[in-house]
Image (tube, grey):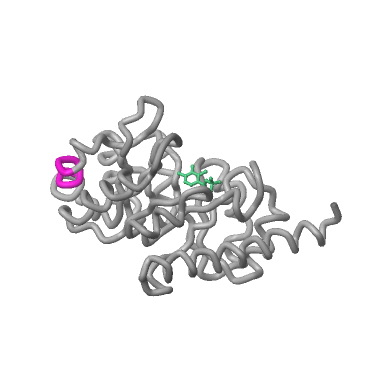
Amino acid sequence: MSLVETLNDSSAAYLRLMARMHKGLVDAGRAPESAFLTAVSKTQPWNVILPVLQAGHRRFGENRVQEAKERWSPVRGDWPGLELRLIGPLQSNKAEEAVGFFDVIETVDRQKIARALAEEIQKQGRRPVTYVQVNIGEEDQKAGILPAEADGFIRECREVFGLEVAGLMCIPPVEGPRGPYFALLRKIAQRNGVTHLSMGMSDDFEAALAFGSNEIRVGSAIFGAR
Ligand SMILES: *Cc1c(COP(=O)(O)O)cnc(C)c1O
């Protein structure tokens, strides 16, 4: 495939995805502007990311601190309005870099991370927006606070560590219907006064939109398989 064909592919896929997101919202009886897209660029080559930037998109998600810095630091100044989000698990020894680099950190899921982020925010005077990740299907292999512990952890983040908890993020189990998991995340958000719901990926974002997601995180449907 030539470079030009590759470029055309990802910007066309991006536009198709935006149209599907729009339709998903309208089908759910929601306003077309009531959700936005985080384009998940992790592990993707620059030649598929660039056309999406050129098409006007500015919000990207990455799952590793180091990879994100290597990819975006050299070009950040060229794309005003760029918003970079950490959507992968964070180790406390990476808190300094994460606070210094990301605009939004969606994966706060334990005391140790909350404390490390709070200390770095204090030190650096830079305050990324923070979300709590919930292990909504209570899966051993997934990161996130358990649903039963979410209320207490959100309160602790706010009251003990001074983090704002602007949103909740989840990745539901791959097997079975996702609706009940999306509904549960929304319920946890509502009773804790959290307004941003980051849920829905390439293969389930329409269901997530029907359950009130206002931020979908889509990678492979735009950029191709990883
Ligand atoms: C990789 C990833 C995505 C995107 O997944 P796709 O299935 O490629 O859309 C979304 N959210 C998180 C947390 C991810 O790690």
- Residue shown at the point (37%, 34%) measured from the top left: 143
How many numbered marks, from 0 up? 0
Image-quadrant location for residue 50: bottom right
Identify the main secondary structure in magenta. helix
The quarter of the picture where the C terminus appears is top right
User: Where does the image place residue 32, in percent across and percent down from the top left?
Assistant: 43, 73
Residue 182 horizontal side relative to residue 64, left or right = left
* Magenta residue span: 151-156
Name the residue rendered at 82%, 57% in the picture.
3
Q: Position of residue 126 (x, y in %)?
A: 35, 57
Residue 127 seen from this side: no
Q: Nearer the viewer, residue 130 or 31?
A: 31
The answer to which image quadrant residue 128 occupies is bottom left
Q: Nearer the viewer, residue 94 or 90?
A: 90
In the figure, 134 relative to 82: above or below?
A: above
Q: Nearer the viewer, residue 172 or 123?
A: 172
Q: Residue furthest top?
A: 140
Which image quadrant is residue 52 in?
bottom right
Residue at x 42%, y 71% (from the top left corner): 26
- Could you tell me residue 40's position as x and y percent? 54, 51
Q: Is residue 190 left or right of residue 81?
A: left
Q: Residue 208: image x %, image y %?
A: 39, 54
State whether residue 165 is above or below residue 181: below
Give yes or no for residue 25 being in the magenta stretch: no
Query: In the rendered image, is residue 171 in sight?
Result: yes
Using the image, determine if residue 91 lies above or below residue 162.
Answer: above
